[in-house]
Image (tube, helix red, strand yellow):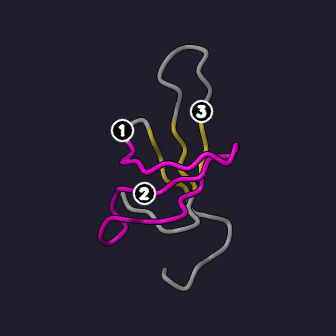
Amino acid sequence: MNAHEGDRLLMHGRIVGQHDRVGEIVEVMGTEGEPPYRVRFEDGHECVMSPGPDSVVRPGDAPTAAR
């Protein structure tokens, strides 16, 4: 998994009835875009995480100079 600041992290629900969660990657703490990531979710909650196989990184809306 490789990500940049501003990308979106989509985590699929793991059980029936659980909704997908979307968060913005605000900091890449690993080397060369690798996890862990600091992620800010739509409700304002932030956490540091290493996403599992049920997660997908989507490019952010605005291009950044780091790319």
Q: Could you tell me residue 12's position as x and y percent? A: 52, 33
Q: Could you tell me residue 67's position as x and y percent? A: 49, 80
User: Residue under circle 2?
Assistant: 37
**Disc sitting over residue 20 in the figure:** 3
> Of label 1 and label 3, which has the lower sequence position?
3
41 sits left or right of 53 in the view: right
Name the outermost residue toward the left. Answer: 31
Residue at left 61%, top 44%?
A: 22
Q: How many labels, in total? A: 3
Q: Could you tell me residue 2's position as x and y percent? A: 38, 61
How far is mark 2 from mark 1, CA to CA?
15 Å
Could you tell me which secondary element the residue under label 1 belongs to?
loop
Q: Amino acid at mark 1?
A: Pro
The residue range painted magenta reads 24-51
Q: Quadrant of residue 29?
A: bottom left
How far is mark 1 from mark 3, CA to CA?
14 Å
> Of label 2 and label 1, which has the lower sequence position?
2
Q: Quadrant of residue 53?
A: top left
Residue at left 59%, top 52%?
A: 40
Could you tell me which secondary element the residue under label 3 belongs to?
loop
48 sits left or right of 44 in the view: left
